[in-house]
Image (cartoon, helix red, strand yellow):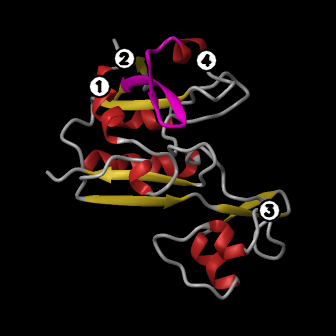
Amino acid sequence: MTHLAPAPDATAADWVVRALRTFAESVTSLVPSGFASYARIFHPAYRRAGLDQVRVSWAEIAAATSKEAHPAMQLSALTGSDENAFPGVFDDAPEVGSLPLELAGPLVTVLARHTSTPGICWFAVWLGFGCLREEVRAAPTFALPGREYHLHSGPVDAVTVNVCVEPFNQISLQSTTTDDAITHVLKDKA
């Protein structure tokens, strides 16, 4: 079973700490600038169909509201509201603060193709999750503007590891703001 290991210290995050000076102003206040490309992964909303949850993409939400889907879209701009439901379109808003597990698995395949070290990756776990397992909380910490993280390492597929005690589920790949329904992924210049 894949697992996260606490980093020996937080020095691996020093370059991120030096690079980020603001909080939640733009993509470069969430992730450092200088990468060849950035990807936004829009966490899906859900519509209830009996006992099932049907995934609703942001493109579907945009179409239902006669708006254009684009890489910089924001959910509240599409729906005109910060509500957790949009009747007739979705019943449950996108998951906030963590990429849904159903998207994390396929993302592992993509991420593994775009790193030369799929067996050695770094993971930042936000301190604000009240459900963190003891071994997750024992990892060294580093601070960024407006947030603080525990630093871990592991293979790329550790993005699917639940960092919380049961019955809570919080996977290790998280957006960098606690109120974001979007996960940001970077691709290095190399």
C-alpha gap between disc 3 and disc 1: 38 Å
- The residue indicated by pointer 1 is 12
Q: Position of residue 156 (x, y in %)?
A: 35, 36
Asked if the residue under mark 1 is in contact with the one under mark 2, i.e. CB atoms within 8 Å, the reply is yes
Task: Determine the residue positioned at 41% across, 18% down.
Answer: 5
Q: Amino acid at mark 4?
A: Arg
Residue 140 sits above or below residue 142 on the image = above
Asked if the residue under mark 3 is in contact with the one under mark 2, i.e. CB atoms within 8 Å, the reply is no
Q: Amino acid at mark 1?
A: Ala
C-alpha gap between disc 3 and disc 4: 31 Å
Q: Can residue 110 be spotted in the picture? A: no
- Which of the two labelled residues, at mark 3 and mark 4, occupies the earlier sequence position? 3
- The residue indicated by pointer 3 is 83
- Which of the two labelled residues, at mark 3 and mark 1, occupies the earlier sequence position? 1
Of helix, strand and loop, which one carries label 3? loop
Nearer the camera: disc 2 or disc 4: 2
Asked if the residue under mark 4 is in contact with the one under mark 2, i.e. CB atoms within 8 Å, the reply is no
C-alpha gap between disc 4 and disc 1: 22 Å
Quick one: label 1, few (<14), some, or many (20+) residues within 10 Å? some
- The residue indicated by pointer 2 is 7
Q: Quadrant of residue 57?
A: bottom right
Task: Determine the residue positioned at 61% across, 35% down.
Answer: 170
In the image as oriented, which residue stretches furthest toward the left?
190
C-alpha gap between disc 2 and disc 1: 8 Å
Of helix, strand and loop, which one carries label 4? loop
Nearer the camera: disc 2 or disc 1: 1
- Which of the two labelled residues, at mark 4 and mark 1, occupies the earlier sequence position? 1
- The residue indicated by pointer 4 is 133
In the image, which residues are magenta? 138-153
Secondary structure character of the magenta stretch overall: strand
Q: Can residue 94 be spotted in the picture? A: yes
Q: Quadrant of the N terminus?
A: top left
